[in-house]
Amino acid sequence: MAPKLKERETFVCLLLHCLIINHFVSRLQMIEQEIGDLLQTRGREFGVTTGRRRRCGWLDLILVRYAHMVNGFSAIALTKLDILDTLPEIKVGVAYKVDGQPLPSFPANMDVLTRVSVDYKTLPGWCCSTETARSFEELPPQAQNYIGFIEDFLQVPVKWVGVGKSRESMIKLF
């Protein structure tokens, strides 16, 4: 059960999932190398201290739902939507399985976690730039649907969407 909040809290969620724990990464059916490299390059995903390339994968909504259960945040800030602009389709992790059996929630046991396989939902991409959008209505319909899918799955509203590097590139939804 999440702690009771006196004020609203927001969870920041990268739309490309960069994982550093190598064993877990290998078990999460990482993106095809070509797409992973594209996301890593477009998103400039390098370790700050080491400069090492981060391995990128699809957004894992089971993990985000678990973070919500533990922390009880009231809204989400989605960042790096623009990194997905060139993809014809986008996958989102929506369920975990172990030995072919669905898991009801994020596993608390590391031994179970290392055996997880992820089920993905494939959504259509938008294949156009979102970098100049300054309101939700200016985003392509497929990007709006992607954001809506995340909200519906998590039952948490998205308050901000990042479409670029500058401060002005953060779209406030409410």
Image: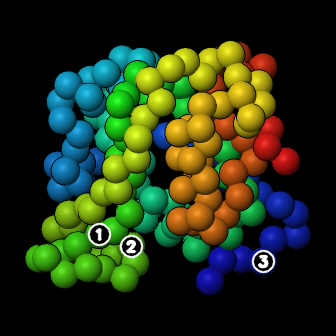
For the residue marked with disc 2, what is the amino acid? Phe
Which residue position is annotated with label 1?
96
Which of 162/106 is in front? 162
For residue 60, side relative to residue 12 (left or right): left
Q: Which mark is residue 106?
A: 2
| Residue 47 visible from this viewpoint | no
* Mark 2 neighbour class, 10 Å CA radius: few under 14, some 14 to 19, many 20 or more: some
For the residue marked with disc 1, what is the amino acid? Tyr
62 lies above or below 158: below
* Mark 3 neighbour class, 10 Å CA radius: few under 14, some 14 to 19, many 20 or more: few
For residue 20, side relative to residue 169 (left or right): left
- Marks 3 and 2, the one that precedes in the sequence: 3
Instruction: Classify residue 115 by image quadrant.
Output: bottom left
Which of 148/167 is in front? 148
Which of 53/34 is in front? 34
Instruction: Classify residue 139 by image quadrant.
Output: top right
**x and y percentages locating residue 154 in the rendered image:** 57, 65
Which residue position is annotated with label 3?
4
Between the C-alphas of marks 3 and 2, the distance is: 21 Å
Give the SS element for disc 3. loop
* Mark 1 neighbour class, 10 Å CA radius: few under 14, some 14 to 19, many 20 or more: many
**x and y percentages locating residue 58 in the rendered image:** 36, 44
Give the SS element for disc 2. loop
The residue depicted at 23 percent of the width and 54 percent of the height is: 28
**x and y percentages locating residue 113 in the rendered image:** 25, 68
